[in-house]
Amino acid sequence: MGRRGREFVATAPTADEISEFHAGPVLDPVRVYIGRQSEDTAKNRADLALRELIRVGGFDRSVLVVCVPPGTGWMDPGAHDTLDFMLGGDVATVAVQYSYLTSVLSLASHPDYGVDQARELFDAVYDHWTELPKDNRPKLYVFGLSQGAYNSQATLPLLDMLGDPIQGALWAGSPFFSSYWSRVRDDRNEGSPAWRPTYGNGSLIRVMDQYGGLKGDFSPWGPIRAVFLNYGSDPIVNFTFDSSIRPPAWLNQPRAPDVSDKLSWFPMVTMLQLALDSMFALDVPRFGHYYIAPDYIDGWAAVIAPEGWSDDRARVLKEIFDRRGPPF
């Protein structure tokens, strides 16, 4: 599994821990992680992940999440532990590592690795899932953080699965080069800000940040729910090359609450500032590219809609994770 895989599997919340929040029957969550060196090709690693997922009973859970990690293979506890608590451990998460490098270095050295691995993993899990009886299989979701969000979006075969769609997706910190995120931002509804756009009638896609965004004048959710969790101060999300020649839309008023009104645009300089800020975007929790548990909780709740969920339940779970402290 490698170091990242061992961290992810060994630190999963136990049923005893989860019972602090979840009344009634509680399970130990299922976690499957395949390290980069486990097999020699992306397809073989995906096939191994599927076999292990079947062996440990992942398809017997109510929810199954196909996760694409960022370049290093790190699995954010804020994203995964919160979901385990929310669902009483009745969830399985599967991931495959495709690199040991940071996302920037991974993209620079072998940009195809992550996309190939994300495609093989999703296809393997989805193909098996579609063979199961619809009334006796888990709800299927995808998750990605940073480069993992891009890889997940780039390989999700939306048109091919319309006959038997997955239930939803949560993508955190989608990089600026993500075509899904760029389309939502650039084709946003008139009057909505570039840093937290609304798209269409909101029945398929909604964008949130640490200040909200999931509630508004939206149509009811459709059969697929996709949520983008992006912070307005995240340079990896908001970088654009044309910021070298014109002010980017996220600098327009009103600005995201975490973007200073003192920030001014200068030709070339602003683009270079964003590029430099991307190198230090993980330094401050809940700003930049440092996504934290409370916001994942709201994102997952919107995507999965757990039975009996409420604002009070969300508050209690956020208090638990405040006490648990930041991720390792």
Image (cartoon, grey):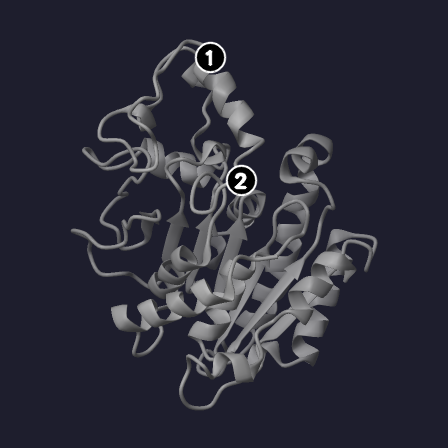
Residue where numbered disc 1 is placed: 269
Q: Residue at x 42, y 82 (%)?
A: 22
- Which callout, 2 or 1, points to the residue nearer the camera? 2
Q: Are marks 2 and 1 in contact (CB under 8 Å)?
A: no
Q: Is disc 1 surrounded by few (<14), some (14 to 19) or many (20+) residues within 10 Å?
A: some
- Mark 2, secondary structure of its residue: loop
Image location (x, y in percent) of residue 281: 52, 36
Along the viewing direction, whichever of 127 and 235 lies nearer the viewer: 235
Tally the numbered discs.
2
Image location (x, y in percent) of residue 286: 43, 46
| Mark 2 / mark 1, whichever is N-terminal | 1
Relative to 316, say whether 286 is above or below. above
Q: Quadrant of the N terminus?
A: bottom right
223 relative position to 135: left or right: left
Image location (x, y in percent) of residue 111: 67, 36
Along the viewing direction, whichever of 147 and 320 lies nearer the viewer: 320
222 relative position to 101: left or right: left
Along the viewing direction, whichever of 245 and 190 lies nearer the viewer: 245
Q: Amino acid at mark 2?
A: Asp
Residue where numbered disc 2 is placed: 283
- Mark 1, secondary structure of its residue: helix
31 relative position to 325: left or right: right
Q: Residue at x 66, y 73 (%)?
A: 53
Q: Is disc 2 surrounded by few (<14), some (14 to 19) or many (20+) residues within 10 Å?
A: few
| The quarter of the displayed image where residue 20 is located | bottom left
Q: Amino acid at mark 1?
A: Val
- Residue 178 visible in the shown view: yes
- Residue 61 visible in the shown view: no
